[in-house]
Image (spheres, rainbow, N blue to C red):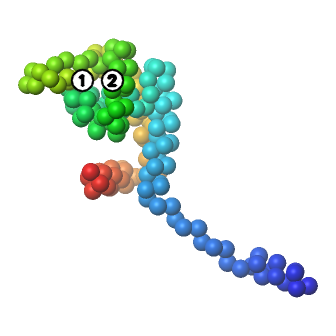
Amino acid sequence: MVGTQTTKAAASAPQPHRATPSLLYMVKQVELVVRSHLDELVKPSGITALQYTALTVLERHDGLSAAQLARDSFVTAQSIADLVRSLEGRGLIRRERNPRNRRELLILLTEEGRELLERHAGPVRELEERMVRELTAHQTEQFRTALSKAWHALS
């Protein structure tokens, strides 16, 4: 009888509240799922999500140094060397000397790189739309602003 009462008491006792996941954890979850979907989208072109990201960085700011491309692509300076070699070998980027600093090589998007980005523009846009489809246009803009502010706060 005592065992039964103890079991009933335990069953009716309030369950411990699980802590809400931290924002850092949630941001990482979103980053991982986006990267997974992006990898699947660009895989037929023989590139990775990280390589795709680097190409989009060059699309916005062509002619970057390897160090700047690494920072803007969220990879280490060590990783960017392999990434650049791979993309250059595929003819998606090219390197040329900086006319203002002959010791520095600038990385530029090739026409083939631009064509690859164009082929993926629609599916990538659809992925982004899917990510925010439960948000209103105003909420989406607030989300974009909040993410930008969070990034600036930590940069």
- Kindly identify which residue carries mark 2: 84
Q: Amino acid at mark 1?
A: Ile
Q: Nearer the viewer, residue 125 or 154?
A: 154
Label 2 element class: helix
In contact (CB < 8 Å): disc 2 and disc 1: yes
Question: Which residue is at a point 43% across and 41% down the rendered structure image?
Answer: 129
Number of residues whose C-alpha sits closer than 10 Å to that of mark 2, classed few (under 14), some (14–19) or many (20 or more): many
Give the mark, 2 or 1, whose residue is nearer the N terminus: 2
Q: For mark 1, give the secondary structure.
A: strand
Q: Is residue 140 left or right of residue 9?
A: left
Q: Is residue 31 left or right of residue 106?
A: right
Identify the residue at horizontal 48%, vertical 28% (top origin).
Answer: 41
Which residue is identified by label 1? Answer: 107
Residue 96 picture quarter: top left
Check the image and report above or below for 3 versus 78.
below
- Residue at figure coordinates x 63%, y 73% from the top left: 16
Q: In the rendering, at what x and y percent does residue 12 appear?
A: 74, 79
**Where's residue 121, x and y in %?**
37, 28
Horizontal arrangement in the rendering, residue 13 relative to residue 67 (left or right): right
- Give x and y (percent) for residue 1: 91, 85
* Residue type at numbered disc 2: Val
Residue drawn where x is 51% and y is 29% of the image: 40
Cα distance in 3D space between marks 2 and 1: 8 Å
Question: Can you see residue 114?
Answer: yes
